[in-house]
Image (cartoon, grey):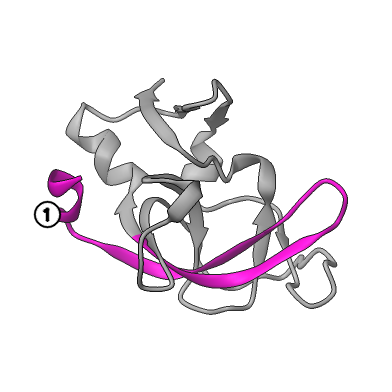
Amino acid sequence: MADLKGMSAVSGYGGWKNQLGNITAPMAWKGVSVNALLDLVGGGGSARVVASDGYEATLSGAELSGQMNVYDPATGEAISSFSGSLRVIVAYAKNGSGLGGEGPLRIAFVSPEKDQVTDSDQWVKNVVSIKAR
């Protein structure tokens, strides 16, 4: 954790929409860019993220570049003309404190503005490993 907090931090807002259409509104997140971590190990076109409960998600190159489905946080409707930028981070702080039962680390998709949410299936909580692929 000390090594992560010693790296250049990325802050932004993000929330998610689950498969039932329920929305968790954008909140403030802080962490380290997944791309910066991948660069430390020679890069990779994608990344496999594993949680403490065995859940796994693969972040594609497009997702690592911020290209994914984006929804209006008020209505849940898809935003086809989203002009913001999304960054994928390994978050260690939420709303200025620790992650509680979601961490100590989790994957978050953040933007400088509170104007979007993304699909929940890639928001991996309780991250224990990230492997370049």
x, y percent for residue 66 = 52, 53
> What amino acid is labelled 1 in the image?
Gly
Relative to 72, 103 lies left or right: left
* Numbered range of the magenta stretch: 1-30
Q: Which residue is mark 1?
A: 6
Say above or below: 116 vs 123.
below
* Front one among 32 and 92: 92
Which quarter of the picture shows residue 40?
Answer: top left
Say above or below: 43 vs 103.
above
Q: Give the mark count.
A: 1
User: Residue at the location (49% across, 36% down)?
Assistant: 61
x, y percent for residue 6 = 11, 54
**SS type, badge 1:** loop
Look at the image and tell me in which quarter the C terminus lies.
top left
Say above or below: 117 vs 44.
below
Any part of residue 99 in sight = yes
| Residue found at the very far front of the displayed protein | 101
User: Residue at the location (70% across, 53% down)?
Assistant: 69
User: Residue at the location (42% across, 46% down)?
Assistant: 103
User: Residue at the location (47% across, 44% down)?
Assistant: 64
